[in-house]
Image: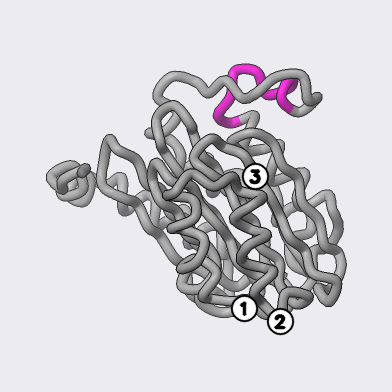
């Protein structure tokens, strides 16, 4: 199983990606986030680590997520084994879930927020991640969940993205997560206001969420926070 969330704020260019899996080192192979451009998560029965190399220039050229994704999967003879989630700079999302992926395979897409996963305990896992993220960051989450409105993000919500991403992942794992159990997780946040945040737990035989929360706490600690603030944002 791999479960991923992508987020793009079209007005600010902030991009976030979150992934968890039952295998090792998910952060090194699955999600990719590019501020002002978009994001992707390439996963499935077997991932294709070269999808991002093809997707990024297409998104930079202004391609919509759906057309960029179609270009990439049409050139891949193993596309039936892939699941790929793409979001462009305008928050439009598209997903490909090949026929060979193991159940439960599910996804949920909205403007600016999208979730996809495979080998899940049920589609409730995707819904839990999606809904938790929206409720943590939006003033109008219920209207978004009902399909009536696009997300209206709270002021300065981006400063709390690491915490809300981890909390949302916890909700997804509580809903059943990976049928094998989740062993690695990672998140990446890019914006034009600060240096990137890239956190990874490459293997856990204990409490994965606690370990990820511990990394967030270390990032928030005064010494590292001062270091992060000193880095160029552009």
Q: N-terminal of the two: label 2 or label 3?
A: 2
Q: Is residue 7 visible?
A: yes
Q: Kindly report the distance in space between the C-alpha atoms of the residues bearing marks 2 and 3.
A: 23 Å
Which residue is denoted by mark 3 in the rendering? 93
Closer mark to the observer between disc 1 and disc 3: 3
Which residue is denoted by mark 2 in the rendering? 77
Q: Kindly report the distance in space between the C-alpha atoms of the residues bearing marks 1 and 3.
A: 26 Å
Closer mark to the observer between disc 2 and disc 3: 2
Q: Which disc, if any, is residue 15? A: none
Residue 32 x/y as whole percent: 47, 60
Dot 2 crowding, Cα within 10 Å, few <14, some 14–19, many 20+: few
Instruction: Give the residue displayed 75% in from the left and 77% down from the top.
Output: 81
Question: Decide: marks 1, 3 in contact (CB < 8 A)?
Answer: no
- Highlighted range, magenta: 136-144
For the residue pair 117 and 82, the one nearer the viewer reads as 82
- Say whether residue 140 is magenta: yes
Which residue is denoted by mark 1 in the rendering? 23
Q: Is residue 4 visible?
A: no
For mark 1, give the secondary structure: loop
Quadrant showing the N terminus: bottom right
């Amino acid at each position: 199983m791999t479960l991923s969330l992508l987020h793009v704020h079209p007005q600010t260019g902030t991009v976030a990606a979150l992934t968890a899996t039952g295998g090792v080192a998910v952060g090194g192979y699955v999600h990719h986030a590019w501020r002002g451009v978009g994001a992707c998560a390439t996963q499935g029965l077997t991932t294709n680590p070269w999808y991002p190399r093809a997707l990024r220039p297409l998104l930079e050229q202004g391609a919509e997520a759906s057309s960029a994704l179609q270009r990439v999967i049409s050139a891949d003879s193993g596309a039936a084994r892939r699941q790929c989630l793409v979001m462009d700079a305008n928050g439009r999302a598209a997903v490909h879930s090949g026929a060979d992926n193991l159940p439960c395979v599910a996804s949920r897409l909205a403007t600016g927020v999208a979730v996809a996963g495979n080998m899940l305990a049920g589609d409730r896992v995707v819904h839990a991640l999606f809904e938790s993220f929206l409720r943590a960051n939006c003033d109008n989450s219920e209207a978004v969940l009902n399909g009536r409105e696009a997300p209206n993000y709270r002021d300065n919500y981006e400063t709390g993205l690491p915490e809300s991403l981890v909390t949302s992942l916890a909700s997804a794992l509580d809903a059943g997560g990976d049928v094998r159990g989740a062993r690695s997780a990672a998140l990446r946040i890019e914006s034009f206001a600060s240096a990137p945040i890239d956190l990874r737990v490459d293997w856990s035989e204990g409490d994965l969420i606690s370990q990820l929360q511990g990394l967030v706490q270390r990032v928030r600690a005064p010494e590292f926070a001062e270091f992060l603030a000193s880095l160029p944002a552009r």
